[in-house]
């Protein structure tokens, strides 16, 4: 199996980040136009949360995609550099990314916190498993 396959889930997560970023721009622009908001009306995140209300969800989701997923990007590089790519890492990576897509889909649609919390928790647990396996393989080799 070519080692480069480990980057496919990574690229898929980057695609999700781009889609969420674009969604944020579109929703914010529409909300600003509808409510006559100018950028100077919200110089802080707190004021932006007040001004945007529910339309702030894409921004919050985008910020979330730069929290735990950053560790996934680093894990992907570690797996590749350490030449650990195998079917298990590919499977775990694709499931992690699928759960992140589900989390974002829920966050950007009906936004039920309990519903989006489940894929968040499951994806994060998978990421800890990935890191545990990297650590174990690195120490044991």
Image (spheres, rainbow, N blue to C red):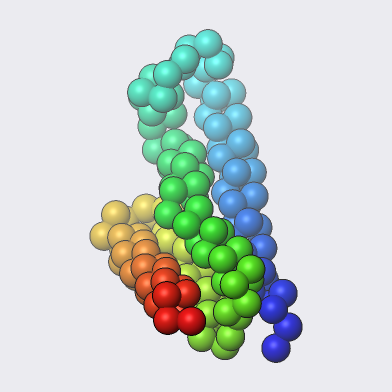
Query: Which residue appears farthest toward the left when viewing the image?
Result: 114
Q: Which residue corresponds to the image point at 56% horizontal and 66% vertical from the top-left?
A: 78
Image position of 95 with respect to 110: above or below: below
| Residue 24 appears in the figure | yes
Quadrant of res 117: bottom left
Image position of 12 with respect to 91: above or below: above
Which x, y percent locates residue 7? 66, 69
> Which of the two residues, 68 or 104, is positioned nearer the viewer here?
68
Q: Which residue corresponds to the image point at 60% horizontal and 43% vertical from the top-left?
A: 21
In the picture, which quadrant includes the N terminus? bottom right
Q: Which residue corresponds to the image point at 42% horizontal and 19% vertical from the top-left?
A: 44
Q: Which residue corresponds to the image point at 57% horizontal and 88% vertical from the top-left?
A: 87
> Which of the two residues, 141 or 27, is positioned nearer the viewer here?
141
Which x, y percent locates residue 14? 63, 56
Image position of 116 with respect to 138: above or below: above
Quadrant of res 25: top right
Quadrant of res 120: bottom left
């Amino acid at each position: 199996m070519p080692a480069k396959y480990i980057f496919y889930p990574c690229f898929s997560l980057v695609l999700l980040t781009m889609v969420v970023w674009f969604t944020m721009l579109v929703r914010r622009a529409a909300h600003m136009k509808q409510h006559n908001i100018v950028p100077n009306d919200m110089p802080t995140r707190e004021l932006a949360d007040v001004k945007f209300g529910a339309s702030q969800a894409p921004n919050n989701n985008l910020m979330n995609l730069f929290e735990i997923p950053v560790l996934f990007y680093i894990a992907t590089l570690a797996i590749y550099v350490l030449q650990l790519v195998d079917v298990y890492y590919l499977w775990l990576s694709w499931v992690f990314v699928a759960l992140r897509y589900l989390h974002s889909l829920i966050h950007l649609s009906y936004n039920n916190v309990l519903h989006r919390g489940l894929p968040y928790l499951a994806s994060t647990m998978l990421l800890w498993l990935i890191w545990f396996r990297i650590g174990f393989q690195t120490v044991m080799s």
